[in-house]
Each structure stands twice: as structure tokens, then as C-alpha cells.
Amino acid sequence: MIDVGLLATIAIVFTIPTMFVRPWPPAAVGGGILDTCVGAVVVGVLVGRLTAMAIDDPHSISNLSDILIIRSGIEFWPGAVAAVGWLVVGAHREAVPVAVRLAALAPAALVGWACFEATCLIRDGCPGPQSLIGLRPDGLTTRMFPVQLVVSIAAAGGAYLVDRLHRRRLPSGQVALLAVTVVAATRSIASIWLPRIGNGLTRQHKESVAVLAASLIAFPLICLRRSPAPGVTAQ
């Protein structure tokens, strides 16, 4: 059975950043956003899926059909680390400073994430706390406040902020770390209201809080170092 909602989500996530985001500096992403990022996205999704399976049901890793059921769960941060690793390797191969490449792609990544969250509307609905004002996900009789739509707006706003600061000469290393901070902070706050089993923090929530704490500690340290200027690439 074809998952139309998921296919539409993939198309939107890849199309919107390519159409509306212009990397800065352009030379840092010479092949274009899509060509530069498609491998990173595939690797990130695969690693995130395998990590989730290894945690929840290690025996299912040997089953290819189970691996392909992406809706069953993906570990966000392991997948993000794998995607960044792919971009780092590509930057080294193309002789582009890593910080410059990551900073140039940060707005597009945030817009892609915003698109993914917003497309909850065409997947299974947008879950959240019960609310008089909200949406009614498929299979439920109560309205829920669409937390993912708020996350989408926050991600898009973060993309705009990161892009503006970069073009105003904020060093590339700081731009890349700021993008990580935006994602970690948004996920940490949003996770408070997303549905979960039990009253404690979920594993994903704890991971986001840990990444947020690490990025806040790292930010003043990276500010003390000289990062490549936004318009500088290696020859």
C-alpha cells in the first residue's frame, strides 16, 4: 500500500527549501541544496531508523521490510549527527571549510524541518494536548492543539533569523551552532505538550534537552575562536 501522505511529505521537504532558500555564500553549496543534501538526508533517515529499531526491537533489524516502515519511528538526533557527518565528508572532499558549508545549509535545513512538521496535516494529523480550539486527528473524537504547526512556525522563524545573522557577517561556526540551538530548544519545549506514555520525560525529550545544554555551553567557547568569515571558501 502506497503511503501517499509520506510521499507528499518527502516531496514538500525536498522542494520548498530548494525553491525558496538561497544559501549564503552561494559558493559554499556549489552543486545546489538538493544535490548537496540528498545524500545526507538519506543517511540521516537510515541511521535514525536503525537506531530506533536497535533500541526498541533489535531483532527486527534483520528484516528489510521493518526497516522501511519509517512511520514506526526514527531517532532524530542520531540521524541528525549522521547527516551532518555526511555533509562534513562532502565539504572536505570539495575543499570547502566545514563551518562555511554547514552555516550555508542551516537555513535550508530549518525550512525543511518546518515543512516536515507542517505536513502533519496530510499524514496522521497533528497531535497535542486536548483543546477547545484545534484539530481533530484521524481516529479521535476530541480536538487537540496542533503543537507541530507551532514547531513549524518556530523552525521557519529560526531559519530567517539564522540567515539574516549569517548575511550580517556572523561567523559561520556560530551560525551553525545557533541553528542546532534553535532545533534543540524548539524540540525541548514542544516535547512538553506532545502525547507520551507516563508522566516522565521521553527519551527523545531528554536527548533534546541534553543537546540544548551542550550547545549553550559550547556557544561562548566557539565565540572565542575565530570562525571562517561567511563569504570565505577554500580554494
Image (cartoon, rainbow, N blue to C red):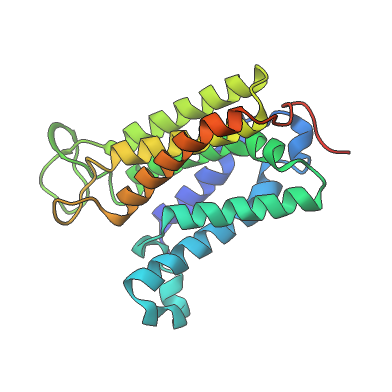
The answer to whether residue 69 is left or right of residue 164 is: left
Q: Residue at x 55, y 26 (%)?
A: 162
Q: Can the viewer see residue 41? A: no
Q: Residue at x 37, y 35 (%)?
A: 186
Q: Residue at x 66, y 50 (%)?
A: 87
Q: Quadrant of residue 148?
A: top left
The answer to whether residue 94 is left or right of residue 45 is: right
Quarter of the picture containing the N terminus is bottom left
Q: Residue 113 placed where, x, y %? A: 47, 41
**Observer-nearest residue: 14 or 57?**
57
**Observer-nearest residue: 132 or 208?**
208
Quarter of the picture containing the C terminus is top right
Q: Can the viewer see residue 108? A: yes
Q: Residue at x 74, y 26 (%)?
A: 229
**Observer-nearest residue: 137 or 38?**
38
The answer to whether residue 125 is left or right of residue 9 is: left
Q: Residue 206 placed where, x, y %? A: 32, 50
Q: Residue furthest top?
A: 168
